[in-house]
Amino acid sequence: PVKKPVLISTWNHGLPANEEAWKTLKNGGSGLDAVEAGVMTAEADPKVSSVGYGGWPDREGKVTLDACIMDHQSNCGSVAFLQDIKHPISVARKVMEKTPHIMLVGEGAKQFALEEGFKEENLLTEDAEKAYREWLEKSEYKPVINIENHDTISMLAIDENGDLYGACTTSGAAWKVHGRVGDSPIIGAGLFLDNEVGSAAATGLGEAVMRTSGSAMVVELMRQGKSPMEACKEIVERIYKIYKNRPDLEYLQIGFIALNKQGEYGAYCLRPGFNYAVYDEKDGNRLIDGEYKIS
Ligand code: SD4
């Protein structure tokens, strides 16, 4: 049997996220504390242009954030189209813990965050603004595949007791239409878990994940007996089938990570370039390249 805890996170920025989450667990934090603290490292890092502070804006130059969090008892919290708050994952957790609801969006989400004591701040960094100015010259909508090896950060955790937790946070697709919400704050799309079976999370083009209820499907396939990797692969193939004759295949990248109740993990993506970070007692914290379908 696999020794728990095990953490798995998307992309290069998964390494510092895992580090922080592991530390949180070792200091007596819960699995929920761990995934929250983990993904907060990417939210706070101005160099990560796809999450939180420093994220690339929409086509109006606004940074709008999506995030969700889920625990072993199927408690969930989510925020979407949230502006001016640096840690959407923490707002999502408050939605989960302090309201009878799961999801708050836009102005309402911001108002709730301010009432909960979060600070209003400008999230558009100089670098992000510069990227935006450059984009404006052509104003062409084409998501960048594997943006400098980071995109959405999703983290899945199984704690010592075998309980599952997950978190997901992003600034969404750069240059999106103002008001666009992706898969990342949608329970079942960007993140899903069932404490009896396993957990899954997505990164990449949110529209493709939403069209297929991606993460929920990965968990369902694990319930039917597939390994985490086989389950991720089957959904990537399903997405490819839908997209293979569509013009947007050109900029489609999709990756799933999954962790089952036994602590076994796996991942699969559409194109090369996706990697994920795994942390366990035996092998420590390391990056693994995702297996992919097409080059
Ligand atoms: C989203 N999955 O909002 C996120 C991240 C992304 O291109 O920007 N993908 O779709």
Image: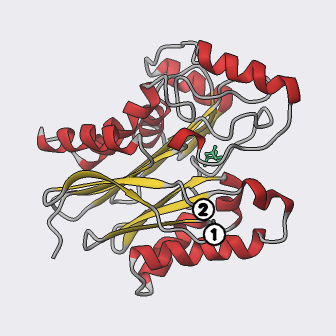
Place of residue 25 in the rendered image (x, y in percent of width and height, measured from the top left): 18, 44
Q: Amino acid at mark 1?
A: Ile
x%, y% of residue 246?
A: 84, 65
Disc 1 element: loop
Q: In the image, is residue 248 above or below residue 176?
A: below
Quarter of the figure with residue 41: top left
Where, quadrant-wise, is the C terminus in this rendering? Answer: bottom right
The residue wearing badge 1 is: 294
Categorize mark 1 by other alpha carbons within 10 Å: few (<14), some (14-19), many (20+): few
Q: Residue at x 52, y 29 (%)?
A: 52
Residue 165 as seen in the image, left or right of residue 200: left
Q: What residue is pinned by disc 2?
A: 271
Can you say whether 283 is above or below 58 in the image? below
Real-space Cα separation, disc 1 to disc 2, in angstroms:
5 Å
Question: Which residue is depicted at the point 45% across and 36% down?
Answer: 89
Give the quadrant of residue 108.
top right
Residue 9 visible in the current orientation: yes
Locate the N terminus and report the quarter of the image it occupies.
bottom left
The disc, 1 or 2, on the residue closer to the chain's N-terminal end is 2
Q: Where's residue 112, x and y in %?
A: 54, 26
Q: Dot 2: few (<14), some (14–19), or many (≥20) neighbours within 10 Å?
A: some
Compared to residue 254, the image places residue 102 above or below, namely above
Looking at the picture, which amino acid does disc 2 mark? Answer: Arg
Q: Residue at x 73, y 53 (%)?
A: 251
- Foreground of the two, 244 or 89: 244
Residue 124 visible in this rendered orientation of the protein:
no
* Marks 1 & 2, CB-CB < 8 Å contact: yes
**Secondary-structure class at tag 2:** loop
Q: Residue 55 got which mark? A: none
